[in-house]
Image (cartoon, helix red, strand yellow):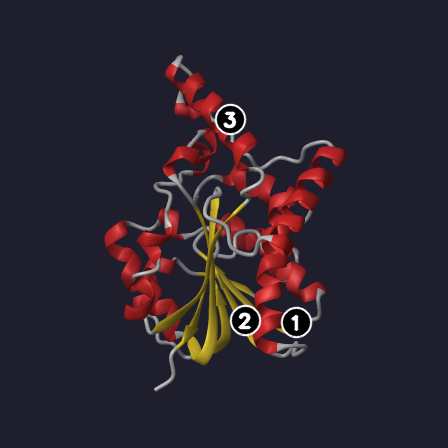
Amino acid sequence: MIGLTDEYEKMFQVERKLWWYRQLHERVADVLIRRFGNRRDIRILDAGCGTGGLLSYLHERGYTSLTGIDGSPDAVAFCHERNLNVSLMNLNDLAGQPAANLYDAVICNDVFCYIAPAGLPSLLIQLARRLEPGGMFISNNNAFDVFRGQHDLAVGSERRFVRADLEPLFPGAGLRLGQSTYWSLVLSVPILLVRLWQRLQLRLGRTPDAAQSDVYLPTHWVNETLYHVARVENRLLPRTPFGSSLFLTGERITG
């Protein structure tokens, strides 16, 4: 998404409000609490942090050692508006950077879709190298090609994933796979209908240049309804077989 200034502006404006981001941030926090309990001094790296919504959320929850990196000058500038500790760094360049600092948790959300398939195993290795032994890796990714639509075109997303694409990469990176689940199962039908309509519009002549992302704030009651539906699903169905997103965790293997 590097270079898409308008999309970063939209993300910055709605990331702390939009139901999808709120639910994702809560999922990440739940993993941290299950692994580290009430500790708030754990060292956290958000690799590909975007405009800093997750880091801001974690800061509000009391986490004190937060670092972010992103390859977009626009994203980094928005993070600095939030007074976040974020540096400009393209994740493709991690291999050339020494792992000088180790973290208790490394988060990499919705980044893999911008990485060439051949480079993904290497990136995962580099991210895992920045974890303390026993540290947690957390990653959310867009899932299933059937959900492709104008949003993917608008943000420059190259691919979508299924569990079989990513799970086999974890052992080679020194990670023991933990949670692996799709989410938004309950909302999959309306999401899918929207994406199918978007693809129909494209076939009827709407050009990719006119594609609009899904990063916008709906009316309050719609936003709150979607948030609570996704939240209840996460509580009652912690692992589901289908959804528009794929959420994975892994633990850095010691020794």
The residue identified by callout 1 is 63
The quadrant of the rendering that contains the N terminus is top left
User: SS at mark 1?
Assistant: loop
Q: Position of residue 79 (x, y in %)?
A: 59, 56
Q: Position of residue 82 (x, y in %)?
A: 66, 57
Residue 200 at least partly seen:
yes
Q: Quote the CA–CA distance across marks 2 and 1.
A: 9 Å
Residue drawn at 66 percent across, 71 percent down: 63
Name the mark on residue 139: none
* Badge 1: residue crowd in 10 Å (few <14, some 14–19, many ≥20): some
* Badge 2: residue crowd in 10 Å (few <14, some 14–19, many ≥20): many
Q: Quote the CA–CA distance across marks 3 and 1.
A: 39 Å
Foreground pick, 160 / 237: 237
Residue drawn at 59 percent across, 77 percent down: 36
Name the mark on residue 44: 2
- 60 vs 176: above or below: above
The image quarter containing residue 168 is: bottom left
Question: Given contact means CB atoms under 8 Å apart, are the residues at marks 2 and 1 in contact?
Answer: yes
* Badge 3: residue crowd in 10 Å (few <14, some 14–19, many ≥20): few
Name the mark on residue 193: 3
